[in-house]
Amino acid sequence: MAKQDFYDVLGISKSASQAEIKKGYRKMAIKYHPDKNPDDKSAEENFKKAAEAYEVLSDENKKARYDQYGHQAFEGPQGGGGGFGGGGMNMDDIFSQFGDIFGGGGGFGGFGGGGQRQARVKGSNLRIRVKLTLEEIAEGVEKKVKVRRKVQAGGVSYKTCSTCNGSGQQMRVTNTILGRMQTAVTCSGCSGAGEMISSKPNGADAQGLVVEEETVSINIPEGVTEGVQLKVGGKGNDAPGKNSISGDLLVLIEEIPHATLKREGTNIHYDLYINYSDAVLGTSKEVETVKGKVKIKIDAGTQSGKILRLKGKGLPSIERYGTGDFLIHINVWTPQELNKEQRQFFEKMTTNENFAPNPNTSDKSFFEKVKDMFS
């Protein structure tokens, strides 16, 4: 099913300013807020759609990409890299990211006690590195990794925090020159969970957590680049409390250098060495690309430095902008040692006009080739 246009979701025009975008989101968020629409799944979905639209349109870079390519601009990795996390947002993500839109910590202060909405404690994130070959990057790959993460131990029981009475917040009063000011801060007794451990099994730490090893499956999209960070939601450490949510597993991509291929964005470069006879007479060669072997023809009279371009045989773009090319750089290998017969042949050719350099206008210089390569 096609996604609804983000501008339509917020009820604004494509020429809307950032202030109008913010106003449109606040209007939709208030309309579909869960405190105002309890147990209404349709309202909850519309609330999430509004948050997803605002996440993109409130960011100038994402907005520019959306205006040019639409939803396709973000159909890459989930929750990381070049994508956005709107499609997988839960209510806690929305309140934590966009609470300031509502003028406070995630609630509205007027809808069924929304202003007292208790924040759910989130566990800490874990970070790992995953190394990929060029072949894996070209096709996309599923990696299974073992992760040691903190999880809630079985048999842990909780009681309401006596410091905050389960609200997760404490009220702090400060005397200022303007008078007494009251602010809400995270409870120091339960770290905002609203609960405290009443009993825990042996082996669990003070928060009721134990360390376990888990095999996590990571779907890595095609075209990722060195340094891209992907997110696997809910596979970080657990947090204490019955209503807590797990942290995330952050995956940093590392690229394993290839023995013969060099990457340049989505393009791949390969140095092909041919002998003098092949350059003069012409030949065909089999070349290994990241997507299998291809056979190429080398014309008679090919000069060293010639670049053969195989369209679409490079790497796909992580942002779905197309596929790069495979560039073959021809290098004519000059023999360094000659026998007597070979030497006599080339000595005769030194005065032969057919062996004299005679470039024409179609033979580009080295600098022109470099310019073409980067244009």
Image (cartoon, rainbow, N blue to C red):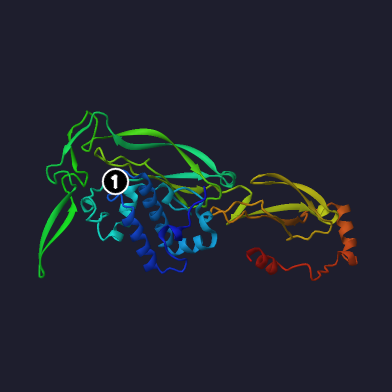
Is label 1 in a helix, a strand or a loop? loop
What's the residue at 26%, 45% (across, down)? Answer: 121
Rendered location of residue 209, percent (x, y): 26, 35
Rendered location of residue 309, percent (x, y): 71, 56
Q: Can you identify the residue that label 1 sits on? A: 38
- In the rendered picture of this protein, how many numbered marks are placed on residues? 1
What's the residue at 86%, 56% (across, down)? Answer: 343
Quadrant in the picture for residue 350? bottom right
Residue nearer the viewer, 306 or 88: 88
In the rendered view, tell whether residue 168 sits above or below residue 102: above
In the rendered view, tell whether residue 180 sits above or below residue 229: below
Mark 1: amino acid: Pro
Rendered location of residue 351, percent (x, y): 89, 67
| Left or right relative to 19: residue 261 | right
* Residue 85 visible in rendering: no
Q: Residues within 10 Å of mark 1 (few under 14, many from 20)?
A: few
Residue nearer the viewer, 360 or 321: 321
Residue nearer the viewer, 301 or 146: 146
The quadrant of the rendering that contains the C terminus is: bottom right
In the rendered view, tell whether residue 348 sits above or below residue 224: below
Residue nearer the viewer, 344 or 132: 132
| Left or right relative to 171: residue 291 | right
What's the residue at 68%, 69% (across, down)? Answer: 367
| Left or right relative to 54: residue 165 | left
* Residue 182 visible in rendering: yes
Rendered location of residue 27, percent (x, y): 34, 60
